[in-house]
Image: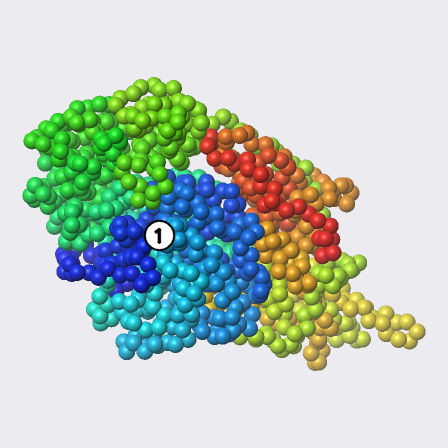
């Protein structure tokens, strides 16, 4: 997640000076020597001998644990015009304990994603780690790796090698059948993640063997397991000059190195980025650092590739409810993504395209439950302005890929236009002479309205455009890509001051689509047509200037066009046509493909305007029906440009009644979704979830582990007065942990301990509470920025057990100290091995002799004491922690129905109260019946009363889908997807509320509709297998 300023002079945005590339006409074409299916050169990747402008985006299947919904997401990705997508695998998700690999159970089986890539027609980039970062717990490492027993991580240490090799081998074997070389769509395979360190001395090129050998071992193992596509790496910056064959030929190099960049900060907490990016200024484009000798020696023969470019930002603990401010929204997508083309980047992958949820304990301490990431597709699967704005560019790059994937930058300066506030980069394809002029504010943070004319070089000579009056506008944080000599079908767009959205060739007739923001003017000239006429218009002003074998058209979009937008159609004399859109109409303009060819040939698409989402298009040869599928958020008019082979059109299986037909354009109406109401979330009952502090509690060896180790492999050593109290050393890794210590009361009450000092490490935002002999003695509430917390707790509010005198002997009744700790996950990179647990626990008091604890025990996740890899393989090892309610399965469906008085009812509706300090579990079962044909998005909302010193966990049908900590964080809304929720049955909702205050706390819980859409997608799938029910086995973990 670390941005960079240069990668062998990759990024060269400079507004003031001309930069002309001295392009070598003989740039070498590279392959890896194993296949020519994927090749590359200085310009771009080539797939099966075709140049490819890669526009990809990332999602994490392990943050979206419903395989039945992966198609829903990927259909949205394809509909937006992306021709590829990328995934991280997660070593820890698949490898819960040494020797146990799970690539088969529920969401652990990611094979269907690769199958979907082929079915839907998108290329795929696999990024299997072993380390992935991703703000995941320990960066995606298995948590058993964090003890320090596996040597120095990310080196060739034999202990670490033995740890990663089984996972790495198996994931490579699973991917192998889906490589493009084997008929699949996987084109790239990434080795490691953001790892510098190839050199001990860069200037002298002195290798660093432990890291170099590690990279080579990963590459060799992948190759031995059948991976024969190009191997890539994503550099966090290029200050390390690592792994590029353009820089060296030493051990560990991959085929292609790309660059990660987060110019607007990877976090909503902007202070996290100032050390790398400098002082934050909204919409400020990073300039490259000055070239070094190493840059000069690094002649880049690889494409400009961004394996991670900012798709949004994560929301840290303490960040704003709902995500980051608006400066990484639609305007960010417009300007920054076009600026990548300004910089001649031809392979982009947005991080994230869909962020998902840190359900369970997937998160590293830096983030809370939401991983929405302000992505184009929201955490609740909704699409909005950022998605639509991104689509305007991805559809363009898909349409012009053949030309845009091979360009030289002829120049970039402020002299191309009549306005010095505007900078322009001129890119030109040396083979076709197609030109691309990227225009934007010279000072990128500027949001002023600037108008200008532009000097362009065309096959008709140097022109100043527009030629018939008016001007080009850049209004706000915007950029434009304006084309010259762009061929579409048999015609050529000589120039256009409006942006190209796409084009299609339907029945051998071109349909060109251009767009402008509302209230702006555009002008374009088409070669190959001699006249034109207005076919239909919605408040646009259109002027036509016929020429000799060319037609020039100017138009102005209306300043306001309502929710529908403005669409105007102009017909040329030969039956081809141009569609002119404003931004509102362009947002809802779709180009579904009729085949699964990722290249999306122009004669294999149809054009559709109007719906919220168009998923698929298919011409049924038997019924001669164009079958469209998609989603609606309201009633709308649909306009379709399609082939004559389609005699009728259907939407989600229903034949449409045609309102009008003009040439290849059909217009019909679509009815929006009906109303839907959630049932009330009532019927709560509660139970004590901290019986461990009660005097009558019986310890079970099935639950409690003796903490009896006096040595640890962890490089951070604890205080020597106790055994090792690091939970990972005992196989306990996630969630809430309970420590139980005993100590005697001295025979002299005057020397009795008076308090305890606790120093605990749990990661940022963690906390803990302590009880002595069942009486609350205090809490450490935590901080969003602190990973350790030390506190002294007095025993003044508690009573030590006295010595009992029987027959002249003293009988000791041990005092019991219980510490409940909330582990917020392991840190990232080298800090992944920072321990979790108690660094120091010392009894305090007047005695000159140090007090000693008699024993220590730890309770964690159910099954840990028996060393079971995961008691719940479907939900996996990261789903639940060690609270009593979790261990015995009160959060699971079919837990024996609670009844009063054992389970009292709540007396205040959805207000869940805990009197005093302690933990309660609240539980209810609510039926949900969503009608067929609807996509209903449901979020739970948790809010607190005046006292925010609490920690609550939300469980939905057994899945932990919310960590509510109002003392530290601000997240209150928790989306839960279908599949986790049963859309056609009963839903078990459980909330554990941990009061860290003697005053008690209250949590209000409700659920809300985020949206209701009609949809072709079947959301009432049978997800029973995703929601394993309670079994009696759980009772042994009480």
Residue 968 visible to the viewer = no
Residue positioned most to the bottom: 848
Q: How many marks?
A: 1
Quadrant placement of the N terminus: bottom left
Q: Quadrant of residue 483?
A: top left
Q: Residue at x 26, y 52 (%)?
A: 49
Residue denoted by label 1: 349
**Can residue 845 be spotted in the picture?**
yes
* Position of residue 212 in the picture relative to residue 428 (left or right): right
Closest to the observer, 604 or 382:
604
Residue 144 spot, x, y in % from top left:
57, 66
Q: Position of residue 6 (x, y in %)?
A: 27, 62
Percent across and percent down for residue 794 are: 67, 66
Q: Residue at x 59, y 34 (%)?
A: 984
Direction from residue 1000 to residue 650 in the image, left or right: left
Nearest the camera: 558 or 529? 529
Q: Secondary structure at mark 1?
A: strand
Residue located at (32% from left, 73% from top): 250
* Colouring method of the image: rainbow
Residue 86 falls left or right of residue 743? left
Q: Position of residue 920 (x, y in %)?
A: 68, 50
Seen in the picture, residue 203 relative to 146 is either above or below; the reply is: below
Q: Work out which quarter of the rendered image holds the C terminus and state it.
A: bottom right
Q: In this orientation, which residue lies closer to the viewer: 968 or 870?
A: 870
Mark 1: few/some/many CA within 10 Å (<14, 14-19, 20+): many
At x 8% / y 30%, what residue is drawn? Answer: 547
The residue positioned farthest toward the right in the image shown: 807
Residue 555 appears in which quarter of the rendering?
Answer: top left
């Amino acid at each position: 997640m670390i941005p960079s300023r240069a990668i062998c002079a990759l990024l060269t945005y400079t507004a003031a000076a001309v930069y002309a590339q001295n392009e070598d006409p003989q740039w070498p074409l590279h392959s890896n020597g194993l296949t020519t299916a994927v090749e590359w050169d200085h310009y771009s990747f080539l797939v099966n001998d075709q140049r490819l402008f890669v526009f990809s985006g990332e999602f994490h299947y392990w943050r979206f644990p419903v395989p039945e919904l992966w198609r829903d997401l990927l259909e949205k990705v394809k509909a937006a015009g992306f021709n590829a997508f990328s995934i991280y695998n997660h070593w820890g998700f698949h490898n819960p304990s040494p020797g146990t690999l799970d690539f088969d159970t529920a969401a652990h089986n990611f094979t269907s994603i690769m199958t979907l890539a082929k079915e839907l027609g998108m290329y795929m980039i696999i990024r299997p780690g072993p380390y992935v970062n991703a703000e995941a717990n320990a960066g995606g490492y298995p948590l058993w790796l964090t003890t320090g027993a596996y040597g120095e991580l990310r080196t060739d240490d034999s202990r670490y090698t033995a740890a990663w090799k089984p996972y790495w081998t198996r994931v490579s074997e699973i991917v192998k059948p889906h490589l493009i070389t084997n008929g699949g769509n996987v084109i790239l395979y990434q080795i490691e993640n953001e790892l510098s360190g190839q050199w001990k001395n860069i200037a002298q090129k002195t290798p660093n063997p432990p890291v170099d050998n590690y990279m080579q071992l990963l590459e060799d193992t992948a190759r031995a397991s059948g991976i024969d596509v190009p191997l890539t790496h994503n550099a966090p910056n290029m200050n390390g000059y690592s792994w590029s064959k353009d820089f060296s030929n030493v051990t560990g190099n991959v085929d292609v190195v790309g660059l990660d960049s987060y110019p607007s900060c990877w976090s909503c907490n902007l202070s996290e980025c100032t050390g790398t990016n400098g002082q934050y200024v909204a919409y400020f484009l990073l300039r490259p650092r000055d070239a070094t000798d190493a840059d000069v020696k690094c002649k880049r023969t690889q494409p400009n590739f961004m394996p991670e470019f900012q798709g949004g930002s994560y929301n840290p603990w303490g960040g704003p409810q709902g995500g980051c401010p608006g400066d990484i929204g639609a305007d960010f997508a417009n300007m920054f993504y076009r600026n990548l083309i300004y910089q001649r980047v031809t392979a982009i992958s947005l991080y994230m395209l869909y962020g998902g949820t840190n359900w369970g304990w997937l998160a590293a301490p830096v983030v809370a439950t939401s991983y929405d990431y302000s992505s184009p597709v929201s955490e609740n699967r909704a699409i909005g302005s950022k998605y639509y704005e991104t689509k305007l560019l991805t559809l363009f790059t898909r349409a012009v890929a053949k030309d845009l994937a091979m360009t030289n930058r002829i120049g970039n300066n402020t002299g191309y236009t009549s306005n010095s506030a505007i900078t322009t980069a001129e890119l030109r394809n040396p083979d076709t002479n197609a030109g691309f002029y990227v225009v934007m504010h010279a000072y990128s943070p500027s949001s002023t309205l600037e108008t200008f004319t532009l000097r362009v070089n065309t096959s008709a000579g140097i022109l100043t455009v527009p030629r018939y009056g008016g001007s080009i506008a850049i209004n706000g944080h915007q950029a434009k890509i304006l084309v010259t000599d762009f061929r579409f079908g048999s015609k050529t767009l000589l120039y256009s001051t409006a942006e190209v959205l796409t084009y299609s060739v339907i029945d051998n007739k071109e349909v060109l689509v251009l767009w402008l923001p509302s209230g702006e003017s555009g002008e374009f000239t088409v070669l190959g047509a001699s006249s034109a006429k207005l076919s239909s218009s919605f408040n646009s002003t259109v002027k036509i200037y016929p020429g000799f074998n060319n037609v020039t058209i100017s138009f102005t979009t209306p300043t306001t066009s309502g929710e529908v937008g403005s669409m105007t159609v102009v017909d040329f004399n030969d039956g081809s046509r141009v569609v002119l859109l404003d931004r509102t109409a362009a947002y809802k303009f779709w180009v579904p493909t009729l085949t699964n060819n990722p290249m999306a040939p122009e004669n294999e698409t149809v054009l559709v305007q109007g719906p919220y989402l168009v998923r698929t298009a298919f011409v049924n040869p038997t019924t001669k029906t164009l079958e469209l599928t998609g989603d609606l958020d309201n009633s709308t008019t649909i306009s379709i440009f399609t082939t004559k082979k389609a005699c009728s059109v259907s939407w989600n299986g229903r034949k449409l009644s045609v309102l009008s037909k003009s040439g290849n354009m059909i217009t019909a109406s679509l009815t929006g979704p009906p109303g839907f109401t959630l049932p009330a979330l009532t019927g709560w009952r509660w139970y004590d979830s901290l019986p461990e502090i009660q005097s009558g509690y019986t310890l079970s060896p099935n639950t409690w582990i003796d903490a009896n180790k006096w040595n640890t492999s962890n490089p951070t050593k604890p205080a020597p007065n106790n055994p090792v109290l690091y939970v990972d050393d005992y196989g306990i890794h996630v969630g809430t942990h309970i420590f139980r210590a005993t100590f005697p009361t001295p025979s002299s009450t005057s020397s009795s301990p008076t308090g305890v000092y606790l120093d605990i490490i749990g990661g940022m935002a963690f906390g803990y509470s302590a009880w002595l002999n069942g009486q609350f003695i205090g809490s450490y509430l935590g901080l969003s920025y602190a990973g350790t917390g030390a506190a002294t707790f007095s025993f003044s509010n508690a009573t030590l057990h006295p010595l009992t005198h029987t027959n002249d002997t003293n009988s000791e009744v041990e005092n019991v100290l219980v510490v409940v700790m909330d582990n917020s996950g392991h840190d990232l990179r080298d800090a992944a091995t920072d321990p979790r647990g108690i660094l120091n626990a010392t009894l305090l008091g007047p005695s000159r002799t140090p007090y000693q604890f008699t024993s220590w025990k730890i309770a964690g996740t159910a099954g840990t004491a028996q060393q079971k890899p995961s008691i719940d393989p479907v939900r996996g090892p990261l789903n639940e922690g060690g609270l009593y309610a979790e261990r015995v399965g009160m959060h699971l469906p079919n837990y024996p129905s609670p009844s009063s008085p054992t389970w009292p009812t709540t007396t205040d509706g959805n207000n869940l109260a805990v009197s005093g300090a302690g933990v309660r579990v609240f539980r209810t079962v609510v039926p949900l019946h969503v009608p067929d044909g609807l996509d209903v998005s449901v979020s739970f909302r948790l809010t607190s009363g005046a006292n925010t010193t609490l920690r609550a966990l939300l469980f939905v049908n057994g899945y932990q889908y919310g960590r509510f900590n109002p003392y530290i964080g601000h997240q209150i809304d928790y989306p839960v997807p279908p599949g986790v929720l049963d859309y056609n049955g009963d839903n078990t909702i459980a909330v554990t509320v941990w009061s860290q205050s003697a005053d008690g706390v209250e949590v209000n819980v409700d659920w809300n509709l985020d949206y209701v859409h009609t949809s072709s997608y079947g959301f009432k799938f049978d997800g029973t297998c995703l929601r394993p029910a309670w079994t009696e086995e759980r009772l042994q973990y009480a």
